[in-house]
Image (cartoon, rainbow, N blue to C red):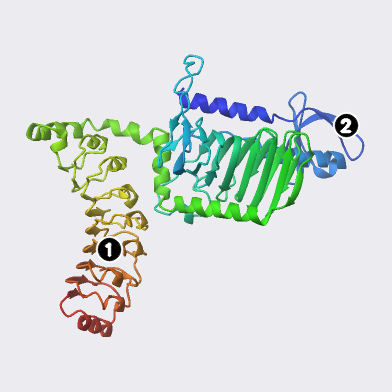
Amino acid sequence: MSNRFLSSAVIFAFSLSLFSAESLRTWTSSDGRIIEARFVEMIGQNIKIENSSGVQFTLPLSRFSEKDLKYAEQASIQSDFLSLGPFKGYYEGAVVIASINGELKVFDPPKSDKYSDPKPIKARLGKIGEAVSVGTQLITGNGSRAILLLTNGTIFTMGEETKLVIKEFWQEEFESKEDRVIDIQIEVSPSRITIGLLNGDMIVEVKKLQHKSSFLIETPLGVAGVRGTEFRLFSQSKFFKLGVLEGRVDFLNNEKKVKKVGVLRSLVKEMDSKVLEQKLLSQESKLIKEAIDRARSAAKDYSVAQLLESAEANNNRQVNSNLEDGGILEKQIEELLIEFKLPSKIKRIELGSDLFDIRLLEKLVNLEEINCPVNKRLSDFSVIEKLPKLKKFSIKYNRHARPHHFRNSMNLEDLKIYPSWARGDISDLSPLSNLKKLNSLNLANHSIKEASPLFEIKALESLDLSSNLLENCIGFDSMRNHLVHLNLSKNKIVDPSPLYRMKKLQTLDLSENPIDEKEKISLRRALLKCKISF
């Protein structure tokens, strides 16, 4: 059994111990008969109870006294604050650090059992883009904040001087999609999450949870249970405050009493005082909204595909599978070194179709060009982030390469990603918007409906978006001062008039678009020096 599973199991057991199973009590039927039993669950219009011998009974609500019915209702609500544990397969989610303002300390979970390795865990500074796992403790410094993105799609902000631990994060496996995280309304896949807020401030946007999911935040004064909402939670050892902007949050205090906090309501609890419920103040609403907008902006370039990469790495999926290709790339680099002597002198490499581990490319610090004529197997492109001088990347017959893999390749000039004869699922071009040196882009045969992220790239001279899902050319004329070659064939374009002012175009392909003859004639007259194909 792995250390990862052991540590997760310990955390799960600890969470269950906070709110244990109901104790035996006396139940009275509507006709006066009594039974000693413990509450199990409510099922529709029935209550399931269990006697001291472990025998369970399911009885209709009409059989119980009014006092018992109130008890069962409260106990049923409390059961919502118990973790259901892992899904089949014990797949774990991950937490991605999307943004850091100031300082974020990370205390990684121990790699072995603490009794056999009692050395204290040292803090390290968090890095934007890294993913952390269950058991990790995060602490923000004075005047600092961090924005975290969970692989189920939930986004939250840690305020200054906040300390929390990721106690549990089980998630069902999910598929890669290019959908932006901020655009989805329902969580990526069912998840069971428990976060321990030891001290400080959290502002959270939870995607609507699926039926088998749970999201719990444990504090010194109780537990908040969430189904899909926007809220702020502030907690200290003797003080607790909850403010809900959207949705509803249920709070179970240490006396096992539940309060339901709805839209624009707040809850305040001090250690020795009663819970105070009141209207959410307007300045508090504004603070929550601004923090959520800021968090969404920080996460705007993340796709579901990126979340999958983080989750897969967290479960050691990609790393393990990549070690079975027989060291193909290592041998190839050794052969190149015979000619170039030093890794720093290798600037171009061509990768074969059998290769599916390219992590060793990070040794080629001056690599400028990567060419993969045919490679269906490559799926981990994280090494691209470690190649700052990369100028050209081309891959064909691959459905795993994505624009976000190149979002930090500031020297990239030429990019080509061809999926196969079947349409690829690239749709979001926003990760490319900051690549100011990009001169040539070929993303033919994908699912692109919107090209606007490319319009401000002044270096772009050649653009191939053929066989996509574009319905118009609006905005393309913003590239009129630099674009020379444009291929928009096999799209759904009816009106080409926005291209009239693109006088620098030398070639334009609009073949297999539903453009009528009158529009074709008008375009030819507008672009007399351009070779146009219809």
> Could you tell me residue 190's position as x and y percent?
53, 44
**Quarter where residue 16 is shown:** top right
How many marks are shown on the rendered structure? 2
Label located before the other in sequence (2 or 1): 2
Considering only vertical position in the picture, is 489 above or below 412? below
> Could you tell me residue 482's position as x and y percent?
22, 67
Of the numbered discs in the image, which one, if any, rests on residue 193? Answer: none
Q: Which amino acid does label 1 sit on?
A: Leu
Report the side of 154 relative to 503 (left or right).
Answer: right
Element at badge 1? loop
Q: Pointer 1: residues within 10 angstroms few (<14), some, or many (20+)?
A: many
Task: Answer whether residue 299 is visible to the viewer in this image.
Answer: no
Report the side of 102 relative to 448 (left or right).
Answer: right
Residue at the image point whose x is 42% and y is 46% from the top:
175
Q: What residue type is labelled 2?
A: Ile
Task: Answer whether residue 506 is visible to the viewer in this image.
Answer: yes
Element at badge 2? strand
* Dot 2 and dot 1 residues touching (CB under 8 Å): no
Residue at the image point whose x is 58% and y is 46% from the top:
203
Of the numbered discs in the image, which one, if any, rests on residue 465? Answer: 1
Of the numbered discs in the image, which one, if any, rests on residue 34? Answer: 2
Q: In the displayed image of the protein, which residue is found farthest to the right? A: 32
**Quarter where residue 239 is shown:** top right
Comparing 447 with 107, the one in front is 107
How far apart are the alpha carbons under marks 2 and 1? 75 Å
